[in-house]
Image (spheres, rainbow, N blue to C red):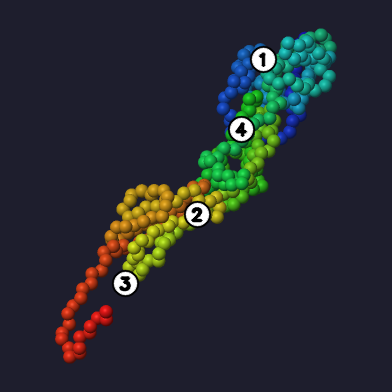
Amino acid sequence: MQAHKSLLAALILFSAGHIFAQGSKPEANTKTEKMEEAVEAVKPLISGKPANQDSTVMGKDTIYVNSKVAFTLQAADDQSTVDYIEWRPKNGEYRKYTQPIRLSEEGITEIQYRSVDKAGNIEAPKVLIVLVDNTTPKVNLQPAENLFYIDGAPYASKNNSYTIIAEDKGSGIEKVEYNVNNEAGKLYGEPIKLEKGGANLIKFSATDRSNNQSPESSIIIIVDDVKPTVEIVPSLPLVDINGVPFAKRGNVFHVNAYDSESGVRKILVKVDAEEEFRPYVDALVIQAQGEHKIQAKAIDNVGNESEIKELKFSVDLIPPSSQINRTAETQEPAQTPTP
């Protein structure tokens, strides 16, 4: 047969929806590593290369697919013309090609194919290495800070962020997609931030290199961006003396905090020259002479911190001093005390 004979082998994939932007990659796992090792081991067997290779091909002549994908074979001969094409799976027998090839068994496999012309010339076999993966990826959402639950509803601060973790033990992750509050979908690249206070809906899914897509997951997170409020309340009203508030003897000071969203987690106080805030446990009693200052703040269950409330007042523990004075004599008779 003339040396200028040529043979065209084309691969056609019947699968839709391929988007090849890389998303979050899963951590290495044993199954994936073994598949990759198998790919490297059989590469020396390859004698041909599919003509219509697309961007799903990962490495020389190795392609990731699922069982919905079909392969078609074509051959050309410019002399005696093609008689038939035949193919065989790994460790199988050659069979004539009559319809698209589908692979149902998961894992690394080979398709060997060749054509024969009407003059009896047999093409040297070519090999396509295929990784069949029919298992959908696993995907979940991981907040940077723990969520706080009230009646099963998760609350978070505006400062929290959310990482989408996707894992696939077959062909590996191709892309991760998400959307917030039903806005246009995005490819996931970095942790998600929620800017809107109140309820937020996050939807997310992952697609592997074989085009298996996980079911869409969703979660509603309530963003609490409202600071708690705090107040310092004396048990007895302060007395204003020349513009200076004085606490009456026996006065105690209560600290109250309020939060209408996730609720108050703790109240902190600082008295006079204390350097650090400390937990508020019980009403404060100030029993030292002089000027005093109470500072208080509250933190809610997602970490929002209130403004610092401050109360200044003075304590006077020194009783007044009185005396009796003798007056000058008068003409009036002296008063005799009534018995």
Horizontally, is 33 left or right of 1 in the view? Answer: left
Q: Amino acid at mark 2?
A: Lys
Disc with the residue nearer the chain's start (3 vs 4): 4
Q: Residue furthest left?
A: 329
Give the residue displayed 15% in from the left and 84% down from the top.
328
User: Which secondary structure lies at badge 1?
Assistant: loop
Measure the C-alpha gap from mark 3 to mark 2.
Answer: 35 Å
Q: Contact, CB < 8 Å: mark 3 with mark 4?
A: no
Q: Contact, CB < 8 Å: mark 2 with mark 1?
A: no
Disc with the residue nearer the chain's start (1 vs 4): 1
Q: Residue furthest front?
A: 339
Disc with the residue nearer the chain's start (2 vs 4): 4
The quadrant of the image that shows the C terminus is: bottom left
Q: Amino acid at mark 3?
A: Asn
Measure the C-alpha gap from mark 2 to mark 1.
Answer: 66 Å
Measure the C-alpha gap from mark 1 to mark 4.
Answer: 32 Å
User: Which secondary structure lies at badge 3?
Assistant: loop
Disc ID at residue 57? none
Disc ID at residue 166? 4
Q: Foreground: 152 or 248? A: 248
Residue to which mark 3 is pinned: 242
Closer to the observer: label 2 or label 1?
2
**The image quarter in which residue 49 lies:** top right
